[in-house]
Image (spheres, grey):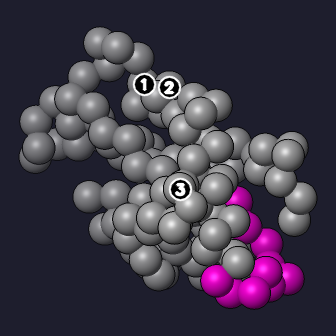
Amino acid sequence: MAEKFLRRQKFRILYRNFRAPGGGEVDIVCRDKPEGTLVFVEVKARATEERGRPADAVDYEKQRLIARGAMAWLQLLNYPDIHFRFDIVEVLAPDRYHPEITHIRNAFPLPDYYVY
């Protein structure tokens, strides 16, 4: 659902479920074509908001894992001079036929201990 949503928003999906060799993970690596920005997307899905919004689960530790995965991806590209950001796509689906999808752009910054 998240991929389909992003494609409709003019994103080009480059990779799904990227796992970095030294740890770190990114659910979707894509390019925001209108902005020309590389985007590392975390997808969080929940059936209800009983325990809060899905994005609430992207805590500091999860952000570190995503950032580590993003840095590994950029290393594979030989650290290009490119703009990138971290987004979250929330999927709330009380039933699978009527999901509510929310795209949070720039959901969090690159942690301070990374320099890019």
| Closer mark to the observer between disc 2 and disc 1 | 2
Horizontal side, residue 17 vs residue 30: left or right: left
Identify the residue at image location x=11%, y=44%: 96
Write down the quadrant of residue 35 in the picture: bottom right
Please tell me the numbered disc located at residue 23: 3
Report the residue marked by disc 1: 53
The answer to whether residue 46 is seen in the rendering is yes
Q: Main secondary structure of the magenta part?
A: loop
Asked if the residues shown at circle 2 and circle 1 are in contact, with their CB atoms under 8 angstroms apart, the answer is yes
Q: Amino acid at mark 3?
A: Gly
Magenta range is 76-86
- Give how far across and how far down residue 14 sits, in percent: 47, 81
Q: Nearer the viewer, residue 8 or 3?
A: 3
Quadrant of the rendered image containing residue 99: top left
Q: Quadrant of the N terminus?
A: bottom left
- Measure how far apart labels 2 and 1 are at the Cα level: 5 Å
- Of residues 82 and 64, the one drawn nearer to the viewer in this rendering: 64
